[in-house]
Image (spheres, helix red, strand yellow):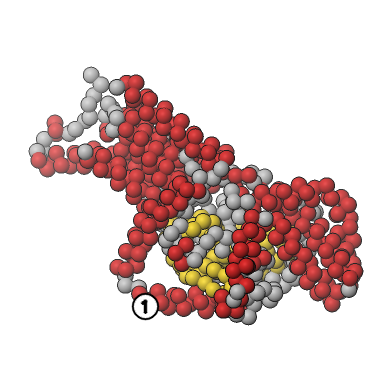
Amino acid sequence: MKVIVLSVLVVLFAPVLQVAVVNALPLPGDGPDIVLACVVALAPLLRPGAAALLGFAAGLAADIAPPADHTIGRLALVVCLAGWVCARAAADGTAGRRVGVAAAAALGATLAGGALAVLLDGTPWGTALAPGALAWTTGLAALLAAAPTVLRRRRRFGRVPRSRDSYPRGRRIA
Amino acid sequence: MRAAGRRVPALLVLVSAALIVADTVTPLEPLRAFGSAVYGGLQDAASAGVRWASGERRLEELERENARLRAELLAARGTTPSPARADGYQVVSAHVIGFGRDGTVTIDTGSDRGVTRDMTVFDGNGLVGRILRAGPGTATVQLATASGASIGARLGESREVGLVTGVPERGLLRLSLLNPSAEVKPGDRVVTLGSRNMRPYVPDVPIGTVIAVEPAPDALTRTALVRPFARFTALDLVTVVLGPLPATVGPADETAAGASKSASRKTSKDASTDEKGVADKSARTAAKGSPEKAGSAGTAGNAESGEKAGSTKKAEKAEKAASAEKEKKTASAGNAEKAEKAGSAQSTQKAENAEKSGETR
């Protein structure tokens, strides 16, 4: 339930946060892609089909949210695939695997999105694949994917102090 | 369960691909309008909340007055004949509330205050761009540095005519002068040429200064790098030119608006008529100043028209495509070359016109 609420929030507010706050910050490079990072971090908590749907909705939202002026469907395609891949690859993994998959998916999706931008909208390669944007997006995706684990660990820590066994390690492949 | 787990993503991928194809074939404007209604409202609310929190009502009034004065100054500075030369423009001020990745920004003023597509947007420093599309409460502005933008321009001192396109990676602009023998040096000011009916660009808005002259690759145009006056990464308050003041134009206003609507579709025709006016003017100045210059322009025009007569049609087509609604899609990678081609064809036209008007005098 919490995940569904989070998904709706991502679809509604991630594009706004992106254009109104993140792109206005004077970050070196282009700044992270908030929509992609959020989807990739949320996907392991969902079933693959639902993750793909979340990716599609969030990507389409980013495609049509006002200042955007590129081919509609470009981000929907890329983010949908990223969400699906993430959900399939990281659902049963450890926290470390989840972070790794999220980072890899974010990197791959940014590259694929850049290539699509060049092909469909004639964006020059330099802006489509800005190294700054790649690094920021990958980093943020990894951070967000690690966030649930870190938060849970801290909560667990408070309840059972000094108990080293209570670290949630995620489910190991038995 | 397994099957459903694969069917949903496959279906969504197909839908995305269908959207891409549909948007490439015919732009999905209803979907964009929906997006700007929903997300434009959210952006507007967010920025309005921030501004309300910092209590800027009085500031906003001052900003509005400032925008009006700036527009009057701009109009007073104008030297090109235009319907609103002495009477200023009707303007509306706006805040930039969102920065896009496609060389676009959102402003918090939309069709409810009379903003429609193809209106000039500038700020205290210089030209910002033009309105790409307007939603109910917000509008999207295409920056001058966007990869699809091309702006008619002229050099401030010599009044030479050219075309400004974006160099998006470096945040600079490239000026292609139509006259290959035009003198241009670092430090020259570049201003807008102005379009007919002042859409999409009003005349004599400062664009930037020339910082470097590029070595000519083909000697048909002369190109230079221009640093824009506007700081595109730190835009805040901008001014949108709605049109000439209604009081001075009166009943003609409606017909002008209608004409501009139909004219914006046939921009290439506009451009050529624009060129004619400009050429007349330049011929006049040339005749006043140095007769040799007019003569040389005439001969250059002859030689060029002989050489490039075939490519004129092609270039016109390219220009039309470039100024069409979805310019980026058609004029993608070869944008620069196309623009240059268009430039050479225009210079031919211009020289021819100059010659003609010289003869009639």
**Can residue B88 be seen at all in this image of the molecule?**
no
Quarter of the image that includes the N terminus of chain B: top left
Name the residue carrying label 1.
B58
Q: Is residue A106 left or right of residue B224?
A: left
Residue ranking furthest to the front: B251
Q: Is residue A151 left or right of residue B65?
A: left
Number of numbered callouts drawn:
1
**Can residue A121 be seen at all in this image of the molecule?**
yes
Determine the image quadrant of residue B60.
bottom left
Please report the residue visible at 52 percent of the width from the left and 79 percent of the height from the top: B69
Determine whether the residue tagged by mark 1 lies in a helix, strand or loop. helix
Q: Position of residue A69 (x, y in %)?
A: 51, 49
Determine the image quadrant of residue B293.
bottom right
A83 vs B146: above or below: above
B346 vs B332: above or below: below
Please report the residue visible at 46 percent of the width from the left and 35 percent of the height from the top: B16
| Other-residue count near label 1 (Cα within 10 Å), few / some / many at <14 / 14–19 / ≥20 | few
B17 vs B95: above or below: above
Q: Position of residue B41 (x, y in %)?
A: 37, 57
Please report the residue visible at 63 percent of the width from the left and 51 percent of the height from the top: B324
* Nearer to the camera, A43 or B351: B351
Residue ranking furthest to the top: A174
Quarter of the image that includes the C terminus of chain B: bottom right
Q: Amino acid at mark 1?
A: Arg
B289 vs A67: above or below: below
Q: Position of residue B313 (x, y in %)?
A: 78, 49
